[in-house]
Every structure is written in C-alpha cells, then in structure tokens.
Image (cartoon, helix red, strand yellow):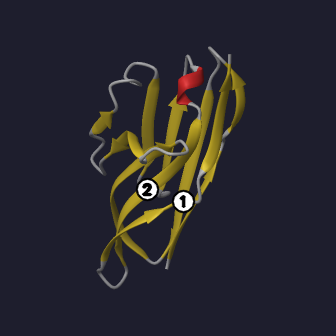
Amino acid sequence: QVQLVESGGGLVQAGGSLRLSCAASGSIFRINAMGWYRQVPGKQRELVAAITSGGTTNYAGSVKGRFTISRDNAKNTVNLKMNSLKPEVTAVYYCQAKVITSDLYRYDYWGQGTQVTVSS
C-alpha cells in the first residue's frame, strides 16, 4: 500500500505564488516519474509538470517559465513552485507517482488533490 499526501494549496491573488508539496510513503521499492496534474469540473485531468528520478523535467506549455517542479528521491517527495499565478490555473491539483512497490508491482498512485484558487 502506498499513500501520497499533498499540501500547500489555497487561495492567492493573481500574480502571487504558491508551493505544492507531495510526500509518498508505504511499500515503496522505487519511484520512477513523479508529477502534478490538474483538473477543473467538466474537463479531463491534464499534466502540469513531471520529473523523472534522474531529474529530467517536462512542463505543460502554459506553465513553462512560471512553474518549477523538483523532487527529493531520498524522501520520496515532489514539489511544485508556482509563480506569477493567473486565474486560469484555478483547479484541483493532484500529485502522481509511478511506483515500483516492495513486491515489484508497477502502479500509478494519486494523491487526494489540493485546491488552488487564484483570484483576479
């Protein structure tokens, strides 16, 4: 069993910053990629940013230059620093981890989601 716990969402004014954090725990052998997705009502969940265990990053075009993803492999954590926030990024943000469990199964785990609201 693996759990992802997110923190750091909230309400911020346009132009402000937020930092999301996610910690994975449980029966983990190794975590490959970790990432952040977001979803608004009526739309599909979409990738915001991802990072491999080696540190290679991938960003949605709309957030490049404003968001930064980072991770600590030793602590099984991933962070998303969001700067210059705009109202259109308002969504529920989900952490995802591509985990190899202690019994060597590969599975994608998700956090419970954290609300990010940017007011204009």
Q: Relative to 102, is 94 on the left or the right? A: right
Numbered tag placed on residue 111 in the rendering: 1
- Residue name at image x 46 percent, y 20 percent: 66
Numbered tag placed on residue 96 in the rendering: 2
Position of residue 14 measured from the top left corner of the image (x, y, whole percent): 64, 16
Which residue extends farthest bottom?
103
- Residue name at image x 41 percent, y 47 percent: 44
Q: Does label 2 or label 1 sit earlier along the sequence?
A: 2
Q: Can you say whether 28 is above or below 22 in the image?
A: below
Numbered tag placed on residue 52 in the rendering: none
- Helix, strand or loop at label 1? It is loop
Q: CA distance from mark 2 to mark 1?
A: 6 Å
Position of residue 42 measured from the top left corner of the image (x, y, whole percent): 50, 45
Labelled pair 2, 1 in contact (Cβ < 8 Å): yes
- Residue name at image x 27 percent, y 47 percent: 54
Where is residue 71, by image quadrant? Answer: top left
Position of residue 8 measured from the top left corner of the image (x, y, whole percent): 66, 42
Callout 2 amino acid: Gln
Question: How many other residues sit within 10 Å of disc 2, few (<14), some (14-19) or many (≥20)?
Answer: many
Q: Quadrant of the C terminus?
A: top right
Question: How many other residues sit within 10 Å of disc 1, few (<14), some (14-19) or many (≥20)?
Answer: some
Q: Relative to 58, is 113 on the left or the right? A: right
Q: Relative to 66, is 57 on the left or the right? A: left
Callout 1 amino acid: Gly
